[in-house]
Structures are given as structure tokens and as C-alpha cells.
Amino acid sequence: MPHDSPATILACARCGAAESLAVEGLCSQCLLRLALPSEPAKDKALPDSPAPALARDANLAG
Amino acid sequence: MSGRAFPETHWSVVTMAARAGEPQGESALASLCGAYWYPLFSHLRARGHSRHEAEDLLQGFFVHLFEKQALGRADRLKGTFRGFLLGCLKYYLANQRELASAHKRGGLVKLVSLDFDEAESRLVAGHSNNPSQDVEREFDRQWALLIMERSLARLQTLHLERLEVFHALKGYLTASDDTRYETVAQRLGVTESSVKVTVHRMRAQFREILRAEVAATVSAPHEIDAELRHLVGVVSTETP
């Protein structure tokens, strides 16, 4: 999991904030920043072509 | 859902209706108050009021709020709903003796449903989250947390058919770029690529939901980003 526990963030794996509030185990600063267009989430891990994966696992995304 | 469309309900409707002297803003205001009254309760408790004092004050405050003279103050309708609510509450507290008669005249306001047991439980649970000693900053902080919780709840409603997938991947909304997904992919019985695509989709959905949630509490679309940046600042425990 990205964080150390569902209730407490010791250090956010994304922004490194050590004292950020947790919202359901997630770093609240990073959650809010997801919605800021000037600081979009960087999804470098995305596959180049998601279509084959989607076709294979069409049931995953619901 | 379209995150680009500015909501036709909520705070923008309240402000426009109030300025035009039209009554339809009241239901939009009641809807907003019903969603966002907890930070007010938390604020009253942080100011040292007992639970029962906070309950009485909040009920009296809502009676006052729904009176035309409270909504009709155009100077209070500028900016965010968050600022409006806290400003009105501070005014109410400063003029409590005079305004308490409104509470007696109006009885308990029925427009806003208040579950004080749940609020008190939430307050107790939140004490482990290092609340700010600045009561106004703490109000904003509780506001930010509520906005995010509501957004996550709305995100979950988009994944009701595959809740186990949602709960398994929710924690990756804020994952770092180099996060590996092999373990969770194995657990879900799917490929790692598929997990990445789903997390990407969930992030995009959350982004739209959160912006829509904030949009409902500001007066104009151009205020959304400023409000988000303000909330980012208040959730940090660093001294501003």
C-alpha cells in the first residue's frame, strides 16, 4: 500500500509530507492536489496502450 | 458527470437568489447546510462550548441564518460558502443575546437535519488527528476533510458493482509514480496493466468529483482553484 497504515500517514510516498492529515489513509494534500489542473497527477506508470489490458480484464473497471 | 459544468445548484444559486430577493435559494442553502454543518459544530466545540451548548447554538444559528435579514446581507454573499458560514456564525455568536429571540420565535429549524450523536463521535475520533489550536484554521481544516470524504464517498458510488476492486485500489489514488502493482493485481486476479488503467480512471473520476464538490461551495468557476489551494494549505500541519 502507498501508506504505512489506513489511519496514519508517517510519510506520504508521493509528496513526502510527514505530518499531512490522513483521509481514509490517504494523504489529504495529495488528494486535494489531484484536482488542481496546474499540478496534475503524473501517471508515468500508465501502459502505452491500455486497450489490450482493458479487453483482457474488462470486468475489473466495472 | 461533467466536472467542467458549473453546478446550477448550491452556493451560486443561493447568492443569485438572495440578491434577486427570490425564495428558491432557500432549498439550495438548506442542502448545503445539511452537507456542511459538521465543521460549524466542531468549531463551536473547539471554542469551548459543551456538546449541549453547541447543539443549542447551532440550532439557533440556523434559525437566524434562514431569516431573510441574514441572507439578504449582500456583503456576506461574496466569496465561498465556507467563508459565509463561518462569518455568519461569528456574527451570531457576537450578537447571541439579541438573536437568541429568533430561536424562540422560530423553534427548531426543520430545514437542516442535524445528527449530533454522529457529530460528537466524529469529533472524538478526530482528536487523534492533531487538531489545530487556531479555531478558524481548524474550521477550514474540518471543511477540507469533509469535502474529501464526500468526494471519496461519491467516487465509491461509481464503483458499487465492483466494491472489492474499489477498496483494493482506493489507497493508490495518491500513490507515487513508481508504485508497482504486481501484488494487488495478483490478489485481484488481473494483470498489472489493468490495475494501472483502473487506478488512472479512478484518479480522473475523483478529480472531477472533487472539483464539482468545491464548485458547489464557491460563487464562480474561477474561484475553484483558489479554494482548492487554500484547502491544501490548511490541511498541512505546518504553521502558515
Image (spheres, rainbow, N blue to C red):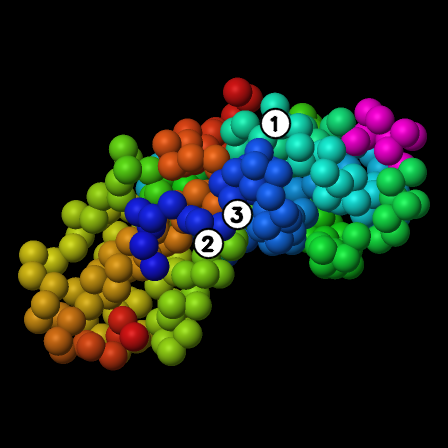
Q: Amino acid at mark 3?
A: His
Badge 3 marks a residue whose secondary structure is: loop
Q: Residues within 10 Å of mark 1 (few under 14, many from 20)?
A: few
For residue A38, which quarter of the picture? top left
Image coords of residue B62 (percent x, y):
76, 44
As displayed, is residue B110 above or below residue B144? below
Q: Chain of mark 1?
A: B
Q: Horizontal placement of B232 versus B110: left or right? A: left
Image coords of residue B197 (percent x, y):
21, 62
Near-viewer residue (B133 or B6): B6
What residue is drawn where x is 79% and y is 45%?
A: B63
Near-viewer residue (B181 or B158): B158
Q: Chain of mark 2?
A: B
Report the magenta residues as a range. B92-100
Q: Horizontal placement of B202 versus B55: left or right? A: left
- Label whose residue precedes the other's in the sequence (2 or 1): 1
What residue is drawn where x is 33% and y is 38%?
A: A36
Q: Nearer the viewer, mark 2 or mark 1?
A: 1
Quick check: is B93 in the magenta stretch?
A: yes
Q: Horizontal placement of B62 versus B3: left or right? A: right
Q: Nearer the viewer, mark 3 or mark 2?
A: 3
Task: Report if the CB atoms under discs 3 and 1 are less than 8 Å apart.
Answer: no
Badge 2 marks a residue whose secondary structure is: helix
The quarter in which the N terminus of chain B is drawn is: bottom left
Near-viewer residue (B42 or B27): B27
Q: Amino acid at mark 1?
A: Ala
Near-viewer residue (B157 or B67): B67
Which residue matches tag 2? B151
Q: CA distance from mark 2 to mark 1?
A: 30 Å
Q: Please tell me the numbered disc located at residue B74.
A: 1
Which residue matches tag 3? B10
- Label whose residue precedes the other's in the sequence (3 or 1): 3
